Image (cartoon, helix red, strand yellow):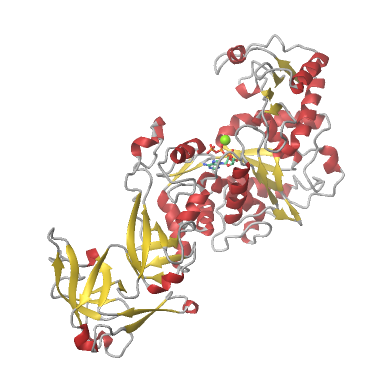
Amino acid sequence: MAHDNPTGNAPGNAAKPAAANFLRGIIERDLEAGTWTQRQWGASPGDGAHHAAGPLDPAKIRTRFPPEPNGYLHVGHAKSICLNFGLARDYGGVCHLRFDDTNPEKEEQEYVDAIIEAVRWLGFDWNANGTEHLFYASNYFDFMLRAAQALIDAGLAYVDEQSAEAMRANRGDFTTPGTNSPFRDRSPAENRQRFADMQSGSMPEGAAVLRAKIDMASPNINLRDPALYRIKHATHHNTGDRFCVYPMYAYAHPIEDALENITHSICTLEFEDQRPWYDWLLERLADMGLLNRPLPKQYEFGRLNLSYVVTSKRKLRELVSEGIVEGWDDPRMPTIFGMRRRGYTPASIRAMADGSGASKTNIWLDYGVLEGCLRNDLEGQAPRAMAVLDPVPLVLTNWAEVFGSDGHIETCQAPAHLQRPELGQRQFALGAAVWIERDDFAEVPAKGFFRLFPGNKVRLKYGMVVECTGCEKDAAGQVTKVLARVVPDTRSGTPGADAVKVKGTITWVGAHDAVPATVNLYDRLFTEAQPDAGGRDFREVLNPASKRVVQAWLEPGLASAQREDRFQFERHGYFVADRVQHAAGAPVFNRITTLKDSWGT
Ligand code: ATP
Ligand code: MG
């Protein structure tokens, strides 16, 4: 199959080709039938004449990812990015990154930059056949006006000056047909004049809209003379004050696709009812010679939802603006920047997206699937390290007796990764005092507890066997120190070290060489799998324990960790050096995920 041999402008996922899905089926049939082979490409987006002057399109298919730059991308967008760029990659096509920046009010450069960075970070780029395929819909405003003009001239569009209320009332509803506007039968000449007035700045916002003239009785409400242009006296981030009419999304989007020679315009299910309008518009513009055939085709797939996560931009914005999280890149946020900061790898996100396929229904994916993808990616890669997250000192009371002085140090070694000898050995030292996990000691052991309790022997991993003798406690009964004796001649890796049998092995770090660190233990942000189900306010189901900060001790090698370096802390899970706060003298790590699925399905 074509996708076994990835080419083009996106990384492959060699280990696991994306699952077959209906979109792949459509594309494979199109390729076989040669549906798109005669298209010409004028080396940049443009109208029919522009493309007709170009050679055959070198891209077998063209897809696009068309974000509106009005917020940060989230995991649902990641799905769409992987799908669109992945299909182009797998079928010899090109995927465009297109900013759908036709709405002057909500869009900002900050978001444009963040989106570019997020798509790149996910591993995709828009350079193919030697050119960049990064486009701005606002660069098509001139064509959109020309097309509107042509529709007016052909008697297919009119300026409607009904009030907004009248327009709404006259649209009808699912059971009632709409009513024609009194302005519907204006002549093309009059419409031309009034559309010029709309553009001149002399008319206030809301005074008029340009509408297509289709059928006010259509059972599809989207075909009841949809609006094409509205008046907005707003400054646009790209075109400044040049325009005071702006195209409606439904008008702009099909045109953007057509100018860019898009073959498969893939969108989410809620646009299904827009498809007849999409086709109507492009067919008319092609009839008038403004666009070439074959025209782009729209296909809808189900949105991706992740359990315990909200993905509406509005709700994400509220989480930030209300201070519920610490910013768009808070590691608990399902934004691409949040997931990046949390420690998710691009490959793990791509694997989740590819594995979730594309279907005709919206899907809820268990959050554990994303975590599973992360574990799969990091298991074979991430260097191991020991860390103590809830530390209590363990004092080896016979150390001086055995080694001559309390200052004596035994050097220990461990492989950075058992399957990756090229990563070398970690070095750390065992001395008279070490840090251990508080719950590795029990004064009175429960049944089946094989770790430290008075009279029991355990191995300090990669170190020596110790025999617990007791503990010290404060007035409140809290253990302040665990006491043990080291068993001579048991150092890991030395002859006879295994002569003393133990049932338990615990992780530890040396008190004299451990690195202090801040570790953020993140958990799900919501306590309910579908936080906003049934219109519930997600604030009612916030998890108060979604972030716990602990002061931990790490093995000394981690002093040189760089931001975004990922490790497996043995027994604890996967952790990343925080890309914002981590610093050489003040390490900050985030827990990405535990070693096992703790989410329950
Ligand atoms: P939101 O509803 O969160 O604001 P949006 O769909 O309005 O998202 P756009 O910037 O318009 O945001 O989205 C860009 C692309 O990403 C669109 O093609 C959209 O269909 C797709 N997309 C957005 N959310 C999801 C999702 N949850 N699953 C799959 N695709 C998505
Ligand atoms: Mg949207």
Res. 249 in view: yes
Res. 220 in view: no
Name the spot of residue 444 as percent of width and height, x first: 12, 65
Residue name at image x 75 percent, y 36 percent? 140
Q: Is residue 601 above or below residue 407?
A: above
- Picture quarter with ligand 1: top right
Total numbered badges shown on the rendered structure: 0
Q: Nearer the viewer, residue 3 or 265?
A: 265
Among all residues in the image, which is located at the extreme top?
182
> Dividing the image into 4 quarters, which one contains the N terminus?
bottom right
Name the spot of residue 447 as percent of width and height, x first: 15, 65
Q: Nearer the viewer, residue 276 or 84?
A: 84
Name the spot of residue 244 as percent of width and height, x first: 71, 26
Among all residues in the image, which is located at the extreme right?
53
Residue name at image x 85 percent, y 42 percent? 52
- Dividing the picture into quadrants, the one containing residue 10 is bottom right
Name the spot of residue 376 as percent of width and height, x first: 45, 62
Q: Is residue 36 left or right of residue 264?
A: right
Q: Is residue 435 above or below residue 134?
A: below
Q: Is residue 410 left or right of residue 214?
A: left
Q: Nearer the viewer, residue 108 or 174?
A: 108
Residue name at image x 45 percent, y 55 percent? 342
